[in-house]
Amino acid sequence: MHTLREGRLKTDMTTSVHRTQSSRQTPAPVLLAFALMIIWLVLPLVPIVVWSFAKRWFFPDLVPGEWSLQAWQYLFSPVSGLGKAISASLAIAIPVTLLSCCIGIPAGRALACYNFRGKRAVQLLVLAPVLVPGIAVITGLHGIMLNLELNNQLAGVIVAHLIPALPYMILVMASTFARFDTEFEAQARTLGANTFQVFTRVTLPAILPGIVIGALFTFLVSWSQYILTLIVGGGRVVTLPLLLFNFVSAGRNDVAGALGVIFILPGLIILIAVARFISGRSGIAELPSRL
Amino acid sequence: MPRLGRLRARKIRFQRLTPWLLLLPALIVIVPLFAGGLAAGLLRSFNYMPVIGLDSPNLAAYSALLRDDEFLPSLLLTTYIALTSTVIASLLALGAVLMIRRLNAGRSLINFLLQLNLTIPHLVGAVGIVYLFSQSGSFARLALHAGFINEPQQFPALIYDPAAIGIILVYVWKELPFIALILLASLQQGGEEFEAVARTLGASRWQVLRFVTLPNLLPALLASSMIVLAFTFGAYEIPALLGAYYPAPLPVLAYRKFTDVDLASRPEAIAISMIIAVLSLIFVLLYAHITRRQIEN
Amino acid sequence: MLNVQLCQLRLNKLNPLQALILFFSITLLTPTTVTAASENEFADDSWDEIVAAAKGGEVNWFMWGGSDDINRYVSDFVGGLLKKRYDITLNRVGINDTVEAVNLVLGEKEAGNTDSGSVDLIWINGENFRSMKQGDMAFCGYLDAMPNNALIDWENDSIANDFGVPVDGCEVPWSKAQFAFAYDEKRTDTPPTTIAALIDWVTKNPGRFTYPAPPDFSGSVFVRHVFYHAAGGVKNLLVDFDQALFDEVAAKTWQILNDMKPALWRAGRTYPQSITQLDQMFANSEVDITFSYDPSSVGLKIENGSYPATTKGFVMTDGTIGNTSYTLIPFNSPNKAAAIVLQNLLTSDEAQYQKALPEVWGTMPAIDLSRISDEYKDKFNTLERHPSVVSEAELAEVALPELQSSWITAIEEGWKENVAR
């Protein structure tokens, strides 16, 4: 328990530092920068939402010439294939996330809790798919998958998505386990807990925030994947990004806007649902600086 | 005693195996898919496929690339886009983080927005940027109503332009929050105590920034920008949607050649992929170098 | 399978390099056998036999997916009829570019997949058809078994030849299209109606015109119009590729296009990369003229809000190029019978009429209207086009043929070398 307490202590210190700072007034330039930053982050989302309800919105009109539900009506009609695309996206992203959890949790533990020869090489191997773009790997992999008859179907796309998704899970779990003290497990074992109990009662609760964050990342990597799905799915696996790309390149701003809104929603919902895991010091993002 | 010793030895041997057993599933996925994909690509890019009769590897695909008028401009453009986006996003993220730390209120709002942005697909961001910045986009319309311009063409050409400003804007929008979140996390890992100490020792605000905060942030900043650099170098969708007609950035060129009806251009496409891979592997090694230095420090 | 093989390799204690090489020689380099497409599989079958074979099946139809109107017509109307009458499920697969479907078949052929391909039908013409036909990837020779083949006028050159390539029973015409321009009445009083006048108009209205960079389909057609103009007419060009003739006409064409450059949008330093981009620039008053290979699209785009309501279609009096688009069954489609039933339905007077309705799509029928039932003859005769779309009679009067693909490729490459940079 001492590590946890230490953690809390640290947080207390940090807040006290804040408190001394906050006794002063925030300077105007900082406030201005704050406002600009908020605007910059939100601004591109505004026209997407507006376009989804717009019709005849031409230069130089600041508001649409007409408000219309035609984009939404089209998308929610059976013709659009939206339902199919969403189910395809989920049927890929969910298995990718689950597989990544099963594979990534032990791997993360290995990288964080053990010292072994070749560890540095394994770390780099795990990190490499994050840095080497998908298109570089998939053009070579395509021929292999063709021969394994994995192309043009969900299974192949799931396998392909694992390449960029799995490393995120491993990295998140490595950073989670790095903060986890395996002594707890040993203590629980000496107190008579069996392996299963140790895992469900001690390990799992401690690493759950990490799993949630890792799963969120993995899901989003798969959810937004375009080029891997296009090449491996060969047009037969139509996910939401493919549908969106179709309408963006066809210049249908209204339909593209509505699809954009739908595209953002799961991430937003998950983010709000898991906000408590992400907020505070447990960092999604501290990982890269860990390895 | 000897028995105990043997048991112990077995236990140690087992412990030595444990990390590898834990890593096995991950390696089974990553090695054939990632390393295998790259290796297969490499063989194909050298036209080496013994079974279909291509058993003398050659550099035909690479020399064809060098003869292709579009390749060099494409390489330069891609490098320029990746470097510019990364530098701008990194500097802005650094500024943003320093700004966020001086805020009294609104921290959680900005934290939420940064995380929200992280979940938004690049494709959606690109759509939003076009709506805002094109010559007939929201800003051009505002400029017209404010009397700055009389027609769309007087508004600066930011999208579909040879300078790739539209592409860079999307990347800055998406990657700034990514870098900023990493920096914030890295700051929370104990950096603030050092600053407090420095303050109590009488350091000025500038001295704290220069000698404590920035050195503290540097490794995380470099590492995260390396990730961004590699990503912006190899991403397809954004340049495919927002690029000018010529030259196409490398990933777009690779995809075009890969899907060309003329099968002969496939090895060229894969050769481009290999070039992208080699350059990003260089980023990986740089990254390793940087983070190792961080550990040593 | 991937993993199993790797494990086996590990068990065999090969060194990593050997293992890798072995691994790839197993998976990547498996010999592929490609057998030629079996032709006439259905030629001797009666129609009833084909319909019976198709019952309860499905058709995967690959087609450009960026128009909600076309998607709706195909999925709702055609898909509905196909299900109701023949118990066949239509699966419309939306793609960005037809070449994606061609590539898919090509990849399958490379991998030795001769009877279980993923594509059953492609909306296709031109270059892509040539690739399919030359690569022996088209299923041919079944047309006589199809009742509605009788409605198709194979004597008509523009039907029997797809961009100069003889169709030879390898595809079924679906729609006719003809290039048409569009302008906004509110911005432009009278648009130029010959290519010569257009060139003049461009120089007098700097920055208000541009065209998508070839090989964009529409941009390429525009350049061909200038090429026809430079040649003084299309007559001499309707032959096999002739380098000397090409060089002579091309030099004039590049001259015209390069002279035009400073007066183009962004002074010709860059071009739109797609017709979509040109359309949006037109709608937002960035340029004053746009064009399309589907003249009816003006009506659809006004109705769906992509174009201002004051947009009007127009043609060049010295002619605009027309073509026919087709549907094609790949050689390795596992659902050929169902695909044939679908093609037959698509060429029925009923489906062609529905497609011609301005609120549905408004595109021109590919069947010979003199051969259809009196009921549909009347319907077609009283069909009203969208008021902003150029009338069919007007289009027919100025129709020009397409060139052979070899000319088109040469023009596109020449443009890239001589005009683009």
Image (cartoon, coloured by chain):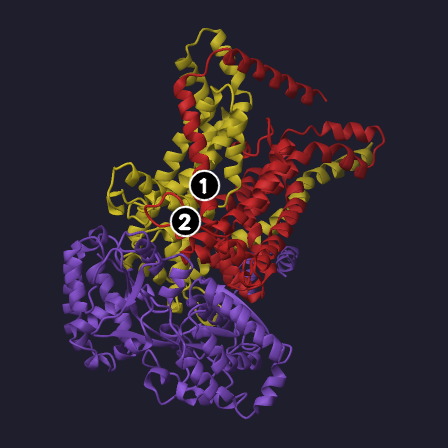
Chain colours: A red, B yellow, C purple
Comparing A177 with A286, the one in front is A286
Q: Quadrant of the N terminus of chain A?
A: top right
In the image, residue B151 above or below residue B63: above
The quadrant where residue A88 appears: bottom right
Image point (51%, 33%), residue name: B113
Where does the image place residue B205, in percent across and percent down from the top left?
42, 13
Numbered disc 1: secondary structure: helix
Disc count in the image? 2
User: Do we see residue A151 in this rendering?
Assistant: no
Question: Residue A136 vs residue C197: left or right?
Answer: right
Comparing A220 with A186, the one in front is A220
**Mark 1 highlights which residue?**
A46
Mark 1 to mark 2 CA distance (whole Å): 19 Å
Subunit ID for the residue under disc 1: A
Where does the image place residue A18, in percent across and percent down from the top left?
54, 15
Subunit ID for the residue under disc 2: B
Q: Quadrant of the C terminus of chain A?
A: top right
Comparing A133 with B125, the one in front is B125
The quadrant where residue B207 appears: top left
Image point (22%, 52%), residue name: C269
In the image, residue C342 above or below residue B23: below
Q: Confirm or deny contact between disc 1 and disc 2 (CB under 8 A).
A: no
Where does the image place residue A11, in percent across and percent down from the top left?
61, 19
**Mark 2 highlights which residue?**
B238
